[in-house]
Image (tube, rainbow, N blue to C red):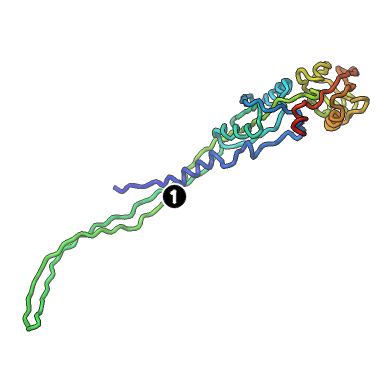
Amino acid sequence: MKNKTIIYIPLLVFVCNLLTSCQNPYETFYKPNTILHTDTLMPYSGKTEYLKCAKDQRADSIRLYNTKGYVLLGEASFEANAANYEKQLRAKASELNADIVLTTSSFAGTRNIVIPLTTYEPGQVTNTYSTGQINATAYGSNGSSAYTTGQYSGTSTSISSGTTSTTYLPMQITRNSYWAAFLRKNIPLFGVFYLPLTDNERILLQRNTGVKVTTIVDESPAYYANILPGDYIITFNNTTVTTPQMLHAITEENLGKEIKLGIIRNGQNKEISLKLNNYPSFTKALSN
């Protein structure tokens, strides 16, 4: 019985390409925090902590670390074949000098594919046996002759060309969703995270301008001034706050100074005074 030889290499290469990629997906799909205050980042602690969180708790997890003085450097989110991407995750965290990395991975579905499996059928081996008699007559120069006879026998082998055939095998690939947030310890200049007003909040407040406070950083100027999550900042030194970008810019202009904020809390207008922090001394040294 002849043996079939399976050509494994194309199959193995195909599967490996499905499960892994030459590119780092945490690098490919990384989106930096475009409003990050890089001048206030603390030097890297030298140790990165990796923490898993539930998919529906991503925002709450980031907010929790915001209150502890960590800021978001950036995020990466992608869907890929289920595999171990820890090496790639750590490479990106190392590049960013992240102190904290929050991660999630969850089942995203399956994908049905077909992969080729090629087999080789060896050629037919044929052995041929032959035998016979040889007669020969030899003539001399003087006209004499001699007659002789002999027997021969032998075996010859021939092999026909082999053939290949390809079978297409169905295969189910598991797909997962991956997400990571990279954070670093930060020196809070103000200590407030905020968002623009939603349409419902504009109707509630009967105004289009202002921002909503979402998070207060512990031991920051805003913390000690008793600004609270849920407050609405409407003025800064009697100037109307129109957008988060405007508040960010006017804060930059007043670092290290006493300021007055007009806020709305529980429908009541309040005025709060506080002194903003300035850039820490180590960032000034780095810029010189």
Q: How many numbered discs? A: 1
Compared to residue 45, the image places residue 22 above or below, namely below
Question: In the rendering, at what x and y percent does residue 38 appear?
Answer: 75, 32
Q: Residue at x 7, y 74 (%)?
A: 147
Q: Which of 121/73 is in front?
A: 73
Q: Residue at x 90, y 18 (%)?
A: 271
Question: In the rendering, at what x and y percent does residue 62 appear?
Answer: 70, 25
Q: Residue furthest right?
A: 238
Task: Give the side of residue 29 with respect to residue 231, left or right.
Answer: left
> What amino acid is at disc 1?
Thr
Q: Residues within 10 Å of mark 1 (few under 14, many from 20)?
A: few
Q: Quadrant of residue 25?
A: top right
Task: Give the side of residue 138 with respect to residue 213, left or right.
Answer: left
Question: In the rendering, at what x and y percent does residue 278 appear?
Answer: 81, 25
Compared to residue 21, the image places residue 40 above or below, namely above
Q: Which of 215/44 is in front?
A: 44
Quadrant of the image for the C terminus? Answer: top right
Q: Residue at x 29, y 47 (%)?
A: 1
Q: Residue at x 84, y 17 (%)?
A: 225
- Can residue 16 be seen here? yes
Q: Quadrant of residue 207?
A: top right
Compared to residue 111, the image places residue 131 above or below, namely below
Q: Quadrant of residue 148?
A: bottom left
Compared to residue 7, the image places residue 193 above or below, namely above
Determine whether the residue tagged by mark 1 lies in a helix, strand or loop: strand
Question: In the rendering, at what x and y percent does residue 137 appear?
Answer: 10, 76
Name the residue tied to disc 1.
Answer: 166
- Can residue 109 be seen here? no
Q: Residue furthest bottom?
A: 142
Q: Which of 209/255 is in front?
A: 255
Task: Give the side of residue 13 with respect to residue 219, left or right.
Answer: left
